[in-house]
Amino acid sequence: MPGPTYAVPTAPSRCGSRYVTGCDGGRSLVRQAAGIGFPGTPESMTAMVGDFAVTDHACNDQARRHGVLVAQLEAGLTSFVVMDPKRLRVPSTKPATLEEFRTFLTRVCGTDCGIDGPRWLSRFGNTTRLAETYRRGRVLLAGDAAHVHFPVGAQGLNTGLQDAMNLGWKLAATVRSGAPPDLLDTYLVERHPVGRAVTNSTRAQTLLVELPLTQQCGQPAALLCELLDELLGLPEVNRYPVGRLSALDTVYPPAAADADPLTGRRMLDIALATATGTTRVNELLHDGHFVLLRLGSGPRAPAVTHSHVNTVAAHDHEPHPSLGSVRELLIRPDSHIARATREPADHRTAGRERDRALAASAGYRSPGGTSRRMQCMQRMP
């Protein structure tokens, strides 16, 4: 069955919308049109990436031992990422060539690894920039339009997807459910510090990649990298960079000063046993609603009746130290915890505090507007 067809405009056209989200890359026209600054550091080094239809796979491990990133892709393609010490300063605007790849691989590996049939060749640099703000009025930014950096560890992909998850449910609540526009300000509050942390981290990682390749700092930098490798072999040390690189350690600032330590953290994707069978936490979030997850049995605060909150009772769950005394979790659509209730707790007080956390998470903070808040929240998608 043929797919849908779309009319391609042949001339400039005009349309209107309540909000515009710029997800149009590092050269974002949306960001430029909104007049949002994009400060940072310029390119100082480059690397090359190429996808090849033909390669001698017997040489892949040899290439990896010499610092070449080799990854087998779909459709029989193999990707090579190389950093040539002799061509670190070639501008990223200059096209990469098959001959450059062959020359480098032969020089460092003794063979060109049989590469041929290039499908895509590119050169990329370590330009690092962070938008001054992620919101200006009704214009918002996400992904590479908000932050660019050297592509190490797929952190740009992780960060961009989490931008979208954070912004998506808030934009839906604002546009479709009558949530106040200042809910979108929490996107800036929560995500801009993450963008700054990622751009700072990738600058440091890039330096650890670049220095060993330079003549002046090569030997001491290599020793530093060996020391870091030893430290990363310690589980308690390794846990920290893994959390940072994966963004699984991202914590959003809680609204209340006395909030539970779990508030703002990403909810663990634990296995759950419910009355209808077994499931996992992430599967409960597919419809984009809040989830009130109740663990174990005993006295409970009154159930949530809002249509945008799904209540799930789990009589058993995969154990984890951080959940030892937790009885109830209010989980946002982006999987971050809005509130955690531990045992023992007065269920009536816990219910009121949970409702306040739900209102605050959805942007309804006016203490005298409970009726209006709840009416709006019931219309959330």
Image (cartoon, rainbow, N blue to C red):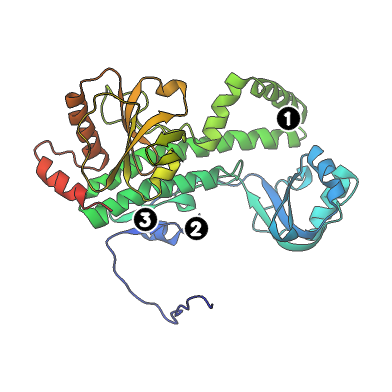
Q: The residue under label 2 is which amino acid type? A: Arg
Cα distance in 3D space between marks 1 and 2: 33 Å
Q: Which residue is situated farthest in the top direction here?
A: 344
Describe the element under mark 3 as helix, strand or loop.
loop
Asked if residue 368 shows in the view, the reply is yes
User: Disc 2 vs disc 3: which is toward the camera?
Assistant: 2
Q: Is disc 3 surrounded by few (<14), some (14 to 19) or many (20+) residues within 10 Å?
A: few
Q: Is residue 48 left or right of residue 273?
A: right
Q: Is residue 339 left or right of residue 282?
A: left
- In the displayed structure, 106 sits above or below 203; it is below
Crowding around mark 1 (Cα neighbors within 10 Å: few <14, some 14 to 19, many 20+) is few
Closest to the observer, 322 or 140: 322
- Residue 255 rendering spot, x and y as whole percentages: 27, 31
Check whether the beta carbons of the residues at disc 2 and disc 3 lie within 8 A of each other.
Answer: no
Say which label, 3 or 1, has the lower sequence index: 3
Q: CA distance from mark 2 to mark 3?
A: 13 Å
Q: Which residue is mark 3?
A: 35
Q: Which residue is label 2 attached to?
A: 27
For the N terminus, the image quarter is bottom right
Residue 362 left/right relative to 262: left
- Provide the residue designation for mark 1: 217
Question: How much space separates mark 3 and mark 1, taking CA atoms?
Answer: 40 Å
Residue at image x 8%, y 38%?
A: 368
Location of residue 274 (image quadrant): top left
Q: Earlier in the sequence, mark 2 or mark 3?
A: 2
Q: Earlier in the sequence, mark 1 or mark 2?
A: 2
